[in-house]
Image (cartoon, rainbow, N blue to C red):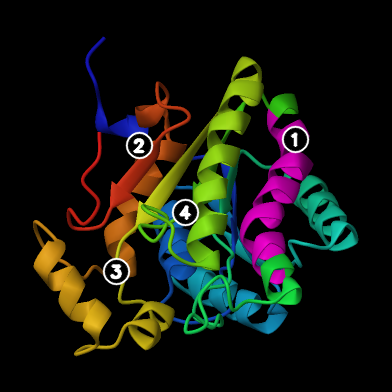
Amino acid sequence: MAFTLDKFSLQGKVAIVTGAGGRKHSIGEAYCFGLAAAGATVIAADINEAGAKDLASRLTEAGYKAIGAQVNIVDQASIDALVKLVADQFGGADILVNNAALMAELKYEAGVMGADNAEWDRVMNVNLKGAWLMARAFAPQMIARGGGKIVNQVSAGAFPAQSLYGIAKLATVGLTTTLARELGGQKINVNAIAPGNTMSEAGAALTPEGSAYHEMVKAMCTVNPFGQPDDLVGALLLLVSPAGEWMSGQVLHVDGGLILRP
């Protein structure tokens, strides 16, 4: 049977994107618009309820199907409320994109040895445990609907990890492969995307033009060293659509050739 472009269609699918309302010109925003353009009904979820609903409003104004919802990905009661909302309004979810994370909010100057217990726990809770809690909560809906797709957001900053952020993202790679093994028998594919230096609002604030890191990335990348949030959408659509059905437990590096690994 010949490959056709309709394998990228998400018509009839329900997709949740976390971290989708905290900032404009964000990766979460780009993911929501990309999923909606492919035909999915999108739940833009964020701890910032007003931001999530604003994004959903912009999606509906563009002619897409979307709602905004508040969720705290480290609070089980908040997650349970989102699970109920999705079940009541849409019958369940088919796609979960674990995009929410702390990055620009973190302090990197003190390094790992200079971090305290509270900072370690905060980063690991949001950037690792939150993805696990969300996957654990929504996998039953996917199983009931005949399968689904989970995509975890990791980072070029995990290869190698050189910060609490990088450690948490590298651990999320382990979560990805573990969930891929455990959930594959229920027809749930679990993969990850590792963005490079993305000029989202958060990324631009963290690595401004002229900074030492900015110049290092320019020297290391094989092609364009600085991407935009929209540059990640193609990888996402591959991983959540029938076009990528034979992929699970993988990390797609979308970074201009910054991280060169098989």
Type of amino acid at the residue the image marks with label 3? Asn
Task: Give the label on residue 141, or none.
Answer: 1
Q: What range is drawn magenta here?
A: 122-142
Instruction: Find the distance from the CA under tag 3 to the CA under tag 2.
Output: 26 Å
Q: x, y (%) of residue 218?
A: 13, 71
Q: x, y (%) of residue 16?
A: 61, 53
The residue beneath circle 4 is 154
| Left or right position of 213 against 112 | left
| Left or right position of 92 against 236 | right
Type of amino acid at the residue the image marks with label 2? Phe
Q: Residue at x 78, y 43 (%)?
A: 137
Q: Nearer the viewer, mark 1 or mark 2?
A: 1
- Which sits earlier in the primary sequence, circle 3 or circle 2? 2
Residue 156 seen in the current view: yes
Instruction: Find the distance from the CA under tag 1 to the CA under tag 3.
Output: 34 Å
Q: x, y (%) of residue 189?
A: 53, 29
The reply to whether callout 3 and callout 2 are in contact (CB within 8 Å) is no
Q: Image quadrant for the N terminus?
A: top left
Query: Quarter-wise, where is residue 22 in the image?
Result: bottom right
Query: Looking at the image, is 132 positioned above or below residue 142?
Result: below
Q: Secondary structure at mark 2?
A: helix
Q: Residue at x 39, y 61 (%)?
A: 157
- Which sits earlier in the primary sequence, circle 4 or circle 2? 2
Looking at the image, which is closer to me, 177 or 3? 177
Q: Nearer the viewer, mark 4 or mark 2?
A: 4
The residue beneath circle 3 is 197
- Which sits earlier in the primary sequence, circle 4 or circle 1? 1
The reply to whether callout 1 and callout 2 are in contact (CB within 8 Å) is no
- Which sits earlier in the primary sequence, circle 4 or circle 3? 4
Type of amino acid at the residue the image marks with label 1? Gln
Dot 3 surroundings within 10 Å: few (below 14), some, or many (20 or more)?
many
